[in-house]
């Protein structure tokens, strides 16, 4: 029985039991979704999003509704942000309305942790992406997806390639892969987009995609986060694709049947070709589908200490 | 028993049984709304809207909620569209989250059909307006409204007037009226806004509203869709109203008690005077009210094959 | 037993029984929230917001969902407003979809009353803020909050300070305080932001915060509503804070333990210092929390005549 989750801020704060419990419950939900319907009825989740999002916001909203929760969506546009209210005040205001969970996306590193630090007991905060720092629910869904295709992570060679410098996904995924004992984690990025030292710890780094991809079982591509660039001298989309895009020819250098992942949104023809994105080796839509189950597991775990059915559902 | 609906893309794709079944069920829902509450509980509908909308989006949302469905609203603003994601990728992403129905509005002709073509089995797509092509749920609600006022469609003379060139409503309504055997369908539009040949088939065309309106039982007015004009040389609002606006004097040329319809939103003082819009012959708000019942019928029909209560509800 | 509420447009339209009944039910809901869950299931509320809002819109939405209502959110952006539709037509369109309650925020004084005047019987309109006129649900939540800290309003000395000229909150709060027999109502505002004569009736006016605050039991601070200023010659934030900001030193002139209120959103360092806003005398987050209970009471009262459980819940 894992220690209850107070908040979900990053993967590093989870102990191994909590990680395995999240993955186990996600698989259970996926296998019997009907059993979990309305388990959290009467609970309230607020989506507090200061950045654009499709898949993450919708995935949390759908996960919550599948569990019977009420959901309210805050976006910075059309809110009191336009009247000069700070993040902290908006959060405290919403928290005073007694939601059970607030899911936060914000452009600043550490935003979710800062809010969790002031949350009253009983309120859980989920980090749905904070700047370049962490995106832990993405790491849970990616691990869930990988675990359905690879039984023994110690044999797994995985490459993450693209804009690693700005990637909270990479940071959370690398931490998750380390914790699950992945055999080999490779990172490949063009010069100005190299990962920082914390992300890079325990990985093998490459500055050339063709060499990096050789023999890997999984390659995860990342888009260039133009919204986080400032003054970087980046190549054109065509030049980037030539050097750093994943196409069928390049994919053929990986291990046979190598799986392709992408957290989305994709920029087709830039970091990935359509042929690969839509090809038989792609797990991209499985990732999205698993996102709902991963987030149902996260929400249930956060609310779980107080739910009668929980010990049963985790058996 | 009508053939189950896979998607609702346009009126032309429906067979006569399906059309009559949709209208019959809408009338039944309207007469006993309580019986249908929560019939689709646990089902998920996504509104995927790439154009502004009040009545259509709200009408679908309310229809779904009246049936107990969960609803999630996607608008292009604030989504991954701003990160360069294509319509097809946004759709596939949302589809992977396992909704039962996706309702799409998009400025491109054929957008909904394109999405339906890639939808996995079990997912139903509803066209809530695609460019100048079709708006089938509007045609269902208009037919429902007409059927409450006219028993015998073969005696019905109806005029549709205004910006017919850009009007997906006209195209779907004309097809619906033909299929229901309307006695006479007249179309009237100023020169640059004439309908295309597919819309015009089986209708009588006029270039003068005063002559077109003579003796009709119903007149449906359409606003000028400024958002679809490009470089057309249009008259001022005043000039347009003088030549093409429906006012009480002009309405008096129609058959006594002639009913007035408008799919909204109205530009008062342009294509219609307030006197007429708010007058006793106006069915405009009945159309809106019927929109919810028509869409409940559409949603139920799309989900129906799998619903135990359905044979009962359609008896 | 109070007379049923038709609409909630302003405090002046309520009789004393209705005011006391709203407050009594809000306290009851707060003490046993579980008893009220799903009491309004199947009912529909539409939020019709033409101005930015966080706390009011969310508070109504959460209140409605706590009662089991369905909620649909209209914001002017992305709606038919962009196609030239008037407020009245948007309202009539939404009203035709048969909601039970429409909650309206609009920049024009009297907007909600204008809509209530055309609403069909059975539809209730709630004014969630109309221009500089009224914000009655704020007055209910403020009275609820005060009543938890002060038993005898006749002994209560309260100061409202800041931008009183543009403040619908002040107008509704002053009316509410008068009706509840508050001992002394003081108003303090800089020259260009003085309240109008209707707000000022029965109050004591000051043009200096230091004198106004002397000996009061409660001080309520208001932000400058920059969105309603036009061409006023206002001081800088620093100068404003020096003359009109509430800080600890100034607060020490009030009665010992003087409570601090603010309807939010706050502009910290302008009309209020963080030391005071977050200090032990602040009721600001209690106001927000009570907002949900006050609005549940309002919604229940509006729907109450038709609800079986009501006589019980009001006992």
Image: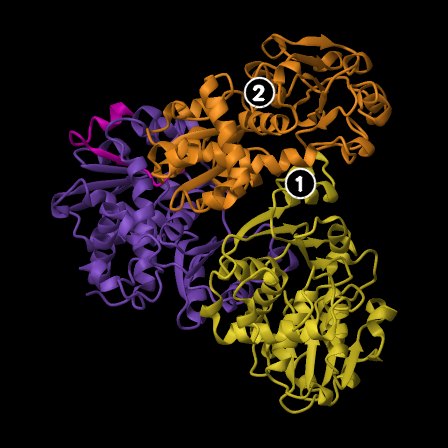
Chain colours: A purple, B orange, C yellow
Q: Nearer the viewer, residue B6 or A151?
A: B6
Residue, x 85% and y 67% (percent of image)? Answer: C192
Quadrant of res C3: bottom right
* The C terminus of chain A lies in quadrant: bottom left
Which chain contains the residue that carries disc 1? C
Residue B76 visible: no
Circle 2 sits on which residue?
A: B172
Number of residues whose C-alpha sits closer than 10 Å to that of mark 2, classed few (under 14), some (14–19) or many (20 or more): many
Quadrant of res B120: top left
Answer whether residue A286 is magenta in the image: no
Residue C229 visible: yes
Which chain contains the residue that carries disc 2? B
Residue, x 31% and y 59% (percent of image)? Answer: A300
Q: Is residue A196 rendered to the left or right of residue B239?
A: left
On the image, the x and y values in percent for residue A102 come to 44, 60
On the image, the x and y values in percent for residue C234 come to 80, 64
Q: Which residues are magenta?
A: A247-265
Q: CA distance from mark 2 to mark 1?
A: 21 Å
On the image, the x and y values in percent for residue A135 come to 36, 52
Same chain letter for marks 2 and 1? no
Residue B177, above or below C227:
above
Q: Nearer the viewer, residue C5 or C172?
A: C5
Residue A250, above or below B155:
below
* The N terminus of chain A lies in quadrant: bottom left
Q: Is residue B294 rendered to the left or right of residue B6?
A: right
On the image, the x and y values in percent for residue C13 come to 77, 66
Circle 1 sits on which residue?
A: C93
Answer whether residue A255 is magenta in the image: yes
Q: Nearer the viewer, residue A122 or B134?
A: B134
């Amino acid at each position: 029985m894992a220690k209850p989750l107070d908040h979900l801020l990053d993967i590093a704060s989870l102990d191994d039991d909590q990680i395995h419990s999240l993955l186990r419950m996600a698989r259970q939900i996926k296998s019997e979704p009907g059993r979990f319907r309305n388990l959290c009825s009467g609970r309230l989740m607020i989506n507090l999003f200061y950045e654009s999002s499709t898949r993450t916001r919708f995935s949390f909203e759908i996960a919550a509704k599948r569990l019977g929760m009420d959901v309210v969506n805050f976006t910075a546009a059309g809110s009191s942000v336009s009247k000069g209210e700070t993040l902290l005040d908006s959060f405290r205001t919403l928290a005073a309305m007694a939601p059970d969970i607030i899911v936060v996306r914000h452009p600043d590193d550490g935003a979710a942790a800062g809010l969790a630090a002031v949350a009253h007991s009983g309120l859980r905060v989920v980090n749905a992406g904070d700047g370049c720092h962490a995106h832990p629910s993405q790491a849970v869904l990616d691990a869930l997806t990988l675990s359905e295709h690879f039984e023994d992570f110690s044999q797994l060679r995985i490459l993450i390639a693209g804009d690693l410098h700005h990637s909270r996904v990479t940071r959370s995924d690398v931490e998750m892969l380390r914790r699950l004992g992945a055999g080999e984690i490779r990172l490949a990025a063009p010069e100005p987009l190299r990962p920082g030292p914390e992300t890079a710890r325990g990985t093998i780094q490459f500055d050339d995609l063709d060499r990096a991809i050789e023999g890997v079982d999984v390659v995860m591509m990342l888009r260039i986060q133009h919204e986080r660039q400032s003054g970087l001298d980046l190549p054109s989309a065509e030049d980037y694709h030539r050097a750093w895009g994943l196409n069928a020819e390049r994919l053929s250098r990986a291990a046979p049947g190598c799986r392709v992942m992408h957290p989305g949104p994709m920029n087709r023809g830039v970091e990935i070709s359509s042929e690969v994105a839509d090809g038989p080796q792609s797990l991209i839509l499985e990732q999205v589908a698993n996102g709902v189950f991963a987030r149902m597991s996260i929400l249930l775990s956060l609310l779980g200490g107080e739910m009668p059915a929980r010990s049963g559902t985790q058996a």
